[in-house]
Image: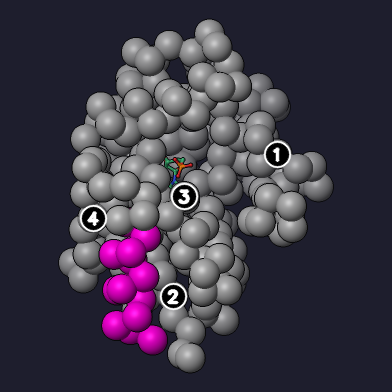
Amino acid sequence: MKKITIAIDGFSSTGKSTLAKAIAKTLGYVYIDTGAMYRAITLFAMRKGYIDTKHFDGEKLVEALDEIDVHFEYNGERGFAEVYLNGENVEDLVRTLEVSQFVSQIAEVKEVRKKLVQQQQNLGKAKGVVMDGRDIGTVVFPDAELKIFMNASADVRAQRRFDELVVKDATIQYADVYKNVVERDHIDTTRKDSPLVKAEDAIEIDNSNLTREEQYDILLKLVGERV
Ligand code: C5P
């Protein structure tokens, strides 16, 4: 069967990665979570003190970019590739609300995008890949055979993200998660370099009222029409 490239873009917390992981497993494709790459660089910047609630030293970060290695290693037990920052497994550390609060600022830096887009293009060049993010169908793989654009209401998305986070940290407040979702969407859609926008040829899925199974079935059908 022909191998294709599947690009899944969309707003934050639309369930892109859950869907992408499931479809990659079924098809035997590689799944790449590009948000995790931006998150890993954000963690690096936070640890170095380049970014906090009061300041962001983008120049220092750009100077340090050559020292940053972000890569994935497959974890057989979890069934997906985990993200590593300079040799350290940071898969869980990059999912905190704190990292979410800074990641969109980091993702605005054009040198950061250039580094990661190049790496993403290399990772996907053999096809047979499902990649999720914000600019996959528009910038990383504009020729992808299948492009999906996921959306859902901000309330539904914030509730989903809150449910995920509160299991790990009972002090998390819904209002903070909601605020973060809306702020990230704003920065992601209005930034100069590669803003989040639906590719002309992308198929939009609003999953506010769809179960995971329904979304999976829609996607599998779309794949079937292209392989
Ligand atoms: O997908 P996730 O929510 O983990 O992405 C975190 C952030 O990384 C996004 O809000 C966005 O600012 C940035 N991002 C991006 N381009 C991508 C993937 C993520 O700018 N391809």
* Residue 219 place in picture, x, y as percent: 33, 66
* Residue 168 place in picture, x, y as percent: 60, 22
**Residue 7 in the image: above or below residue 103:** below
Nearer the observer, 160 or 64: 160
What's the residue type where badge 3 is placed?
Thr
- Helix, strand or loop under label 3: helix
Decide: few, some or many residues near mark 4? Use Cα within 10 Å; few <14, some 14-19, many ≥20.
some
Q: What stretch is highlighted in magenta?
A: 215-227
Q: Viewer-nearest of labels 3 and 1?
A: 3
Q: Is residue 216 left or right of residue 186?
A: right
**Disc 3 versus disc 2: distance between alpha carbons?**
17 Å
**Residue 104 in the image: above or below residue 151:** above
- Helix, strand or loop under label 4: strand
What's the residue type where badge 1 is placed?
Val
**Tag 2 residue:** 5
Tell me whether the residue at label 1 lies in contact with that at label 4, contact meaning CB atoms closer than 8 angstroms: no
Between discs 3 and 2, the one toward the N terminus: 2
What's the residue type where badge 4 is placed?
Ile
Let me know if residue 213 is in the magenta part.
no
- The residue positioned 49% from the left and 29% from the top of the image is 164
**Tag 3 residue:** 18
- Helix, strand or loop under label 1: loop
Q: Which residue lies furthest to the right in this view?
A: 87
Tell me whether the residue at label 3 lies in contact with that at label 1, contact meaning CB atoms closer than 8 angstroms: no
**Tag 1 residue:** 90
